């Protein structure tokens, strides 16, 4: 039992072992006996549209649909790599789409769920790009391109992202404490689960005189990472290949 949380898998054809690990994890007893599975963004390295005819999206849809068909709800929240994932793919894959910043009750504890990128407010350049690419007009323009053109566009975007990461201080790309506090106050929650920063940890701190908790999910670049939440505890651990 328990609710499971994963994020930042960045599934890509260049790392087939991680896709296999994802499929193995979803087919295992832990997931199939869970109360719910949450995927909090960046499931793939790049999402070029629900009409992508590549094999990887089909494999993902089969794996997540099988979990849903086994009676386990699968929730998906978009990240900065897969924000163009839409209703058509969600239907095929058995996903329930979540807005970034939703609050879910985790066994009596209201918990704010986020991808986490909007909390990195010190990274001004990234936030400017995020505002541009999340605009409906921008997404519509990209989706009007051919699949080959979108693949080339996504490859260039990944190169630009790597260059930005390499040239930006790590502290700037982490969450801003004031942004975290503001988000939690706005949601009326003292517990937060997010990904994006690839810095898995459980942080305890004071929020307006109350004990608060922020759990950061790990990435899946070289191994898996999962958070298991039960009524009794929270366990954040790595999954080996």
Image (tube, grey):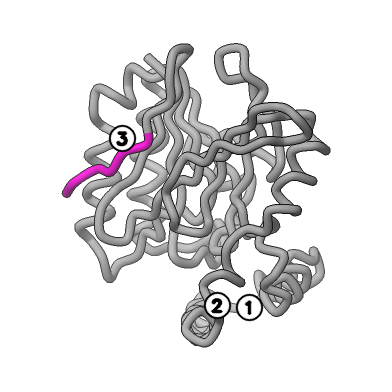
Query: Which badge, 1 or 3, comes first in the chain's sequence?
Result: 3
Q: Which mark is residue 145?
A: 1
* x then y, percent, for residue 29: 24, 22
The answer to which image quadrant residue 45 occupies is bottom left
Instruction: State how far apart marks 1 and 3 are (Cα).
Output: 33 Å
Task: Give the residue at x 23% y 61%.
Answer: 16
Question: Secondary structure under badge 1?
Answer: loop
Question: Can you say whether 17 is above or below 236 in the image?
Answer: below
Eye-nearest disc, 2 or 1: 2
Of 204 and 118, the residue lying toward us: 204
Q: Residue 150 carries which label?
A: 2
Evaluate whether residue 72 shows in this view: no
Measuring 74% from the left and 44% from the top, which residue is drawn there? 181
Residue 225 position, x and y percent, is 34, 45
Disc 3 is placed on an element classified as: helix
Q: Give the range drawn in magenta.
A: 236-241
Report which residue position mark 3 lands on. 26
Residue 72 lies in quadrant: top left
The residue shown at (61%, 52%) is 116
* Left or right of residue 3: residue 97: right
| Mark 2 → mark 1, Cα distance in angstroms | 6 Å
Sequence-wise, the earlier of marks 2 and 3 is: 3
2 and 1 marks in contact (CB < 8 Å) = yes
| Viewer-nearest residue: 172 or 3 | 172
Mark 1 or mark 3, whichever is nearer to me: 3
Asked if the magenta segment contains residue 237, the reply would be yes
Q: Point out residue 42 in the picture as x, y percentages from the top left corner.
A: 50, 56
Q: Are marks 1 and 3 in contact (CB under 8 Å)?
A: no
């Amino acid at each position: 039992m328990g609710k499971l949380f994963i994020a930042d898998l960045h599934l890509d054809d260049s790392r087939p072992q991680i896709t296999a690990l994802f499929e193995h994890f979803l087919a295992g007893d832990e997931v199939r006996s869970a109360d719910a599975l949450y995927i909090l963004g960046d499931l793939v390295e790049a999402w070029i549209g629900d009409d992508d005819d590549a094999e990887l999206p089909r494999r993902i849809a089969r794996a997540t649909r099988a979990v849903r068909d086994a009676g386990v709800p699968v929730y998906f929240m978009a990240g900065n790599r897969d924000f163009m994932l839409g209703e058509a793919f969600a239907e095929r894959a058995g996903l329930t789409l979540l807005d970034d910043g939703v609050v879910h009750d985790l066994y009596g504890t209201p918990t704010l769920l986020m991808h986490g990128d909007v909390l990195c407010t010190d990274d001004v350049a990234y936030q400017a790009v995020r505002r541009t690419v999340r605009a409906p007009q921008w997404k519509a323009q990209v989706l009007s391109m051919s699949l080959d053109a979108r693949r080339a566009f996504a490859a260039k975007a990944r190169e630009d992202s790597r260059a930005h990461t390499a040239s930006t201080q790590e502290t700037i790309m982490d969450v801003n404490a004031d942004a975290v506090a503001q988000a939690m106050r706005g949601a009326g929650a003292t517990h937060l689960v997010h990904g994006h920063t690839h810095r898995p940890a459980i942080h305890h701190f004071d929020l307006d005189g109350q004990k608060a908790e922020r759990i950061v999910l790990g990435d899946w670049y070289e191994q898996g990472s999962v958070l298991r939440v039960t009524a009794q505890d929270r366990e954040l651990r790595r999954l080996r290949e």
